[in-house]
Amino acid sequence: MNRSVFSIIRMTFQTYLKTRFVFWLIVFIVGGCIFFPGIVTDGASVRGMNRMLLCWTLGFSVFMLGVGMLWVSCTSFSSDFDDGRLAGAVLTPTGAFCQWFGRWLGLGVIAGSILIVVYAAVYLNLKFRYGGGMPTEQLLTQTDDSASAAADDLFSEMLLKGGISDDSAMEELRAGIKNRICGSYLPVNPGSARVWKFNAPKGGFSVENKLKVNFSYLASYGGTGSSGDIGKCQVLLPDGTVVGTAVVDDKVGGMFSFETDSGKMSECRYFEVVFTNTQDLAEGSAVLVDHGASVLVYVNKGTVAGNMLRSFLVSFSVLLLLVGMGLAVGMVFSFPVAVFSAAVLVCVVFVGRSEFLPDGEAVMTSHIAAADEKPMLAEMSLKFSRTMSIVIRKATDPIYSAGAFDKLGDGLLIDAGDVLWCFITAGIVMPMIMGAAGAFFLKRREFV
């Protein structure tokens, strides 16, 4: 079997490396990576050019490479069938899955080699033309109890104001606050504070780390006090030690950012960011904050080259998935039908990630019942659509959770665990399942 696989890989190299399609694909993609950013600029800002190169240019190049490899992989089996060049798996010692596996490895190596050239061209362009791009930062996550603790604090503050004595009303209020604490702007009244708890990065803080806190809010400008300050932000250790403090002025337009050293935070597993409304109790106004999005904390970690390597592995996983999909479809259908089927599968998998909300289901069900349609057929169709949506979402979650191009363009560190999970599931497991299914149908196709 090993000798047969290596023979198929060698034949795949010889077949597709000689084609003009692969040559012009390389020229088009690499040329676009080099010359396109020079034509389209974003005000010459570092952030704009960083996103132009690492998100849009690189993403479009990988997209075009994926389209090309999907086309080539669809032609691999289907063209051999149409020209009568494929020896039946029943008549040869090489099994159907072995034939798929050899071609998958061969085309995967070709796709990976082109992808290396693409990433190298983008990196060299970024380094020598735009000075290396933005520094890489890690977005820190809130602790599991951060939102619930903030909801309890806000609930206790509302109880102190009085006016609620019924137990059922108290529980309803508590539940409403916990449901709205993330995703809604809730008030921080003068003299009150809101606390966010964040996990320390994996491996802890180092002396070189700088902690950057972005604070966004909604407030009524003017009349906040003699100094115009609406509050202060503090970074605290679990024992209450203040690491950094910044005053929030009402002139900053709802967005405030400050940095602080993290040298004292090397031993802590979590820390707190506290905003205190320092306005006058009588004349001041509330500041509205969203517990889920108002405070974002970053720490400088990693390099652009390392982040591009992680993005490369995610992109390579997607290419392996597309190659495996194209080969499997080509084992079942003739070339035109194979290309059409592969395009439909790609649209379903990567474009059709929809969420079925309970409210939408209720509206659809009531509408169907009101129209006097057959409820059984409608219910079966709805259940099938929902099941397929859940399956597709879970299958593609490893790719989307990595967020390779968005994070790369924004200078955010791509999580190594997400990259590994994406490579295992999207780059190995899912193509193997498609190859096994294609081999199953190929054996039956030979007898037709």
Image (spheres, rainbow, N blue to C red):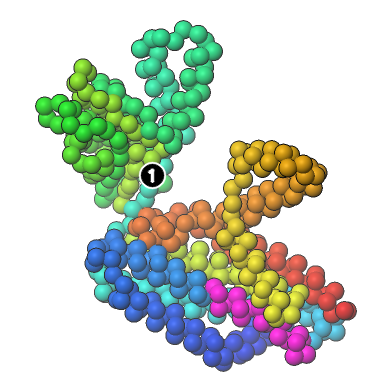
Please state which amino acid type lies under the numbered disc 1: Leu
Residue beneath the point at 59% across and 52% down: 354
Q: Nearer the viewer, residue 378 or 442?
A: 378
The image shows residue 293, relative to residue 37, as above or below, that is: above
Percent position of residue 21, x then y = 54, 87
The image shows residue 406, relative to residue 187, as above or below, that is: below
Q: Is residue 78 magenta?
A: yes
Instruction: Kindly give the residue lying farthest to the left in the view shown.
Output: 226
Residue beneath the point at 35% across and 38% down: 294
Residue beneath the point at 59% across and 87% down: 16
Q: Main secondary structure of the magenta part?
A: helix
Asked if residue 155 lies left or right of residue 73, the reply is left
Percent position of residue 214, x then y = 29, 43
The image shows residue 123, relative to residue 30, as above or below, that is: above
Q: In which quarter of the image is the C terminus?
A: bottom right
Q: Mark 1 points at which residue?
A: 140
Q: Which of 440 and 6 is in front in this view?
A: 440
Range of the magenta residues? 66-86
Residue 437, quarter of the rendered image = bottom right
Disc 1 is placed on an element classified as loop
Residue beneath the point at 41% across and 37% down: 292
Percent position of residue 96, x then y = 77, 76
Q: Is residue 353 visible?
A: yes
The image shows residue 106, relative to residue 304, as above or below, that is: below
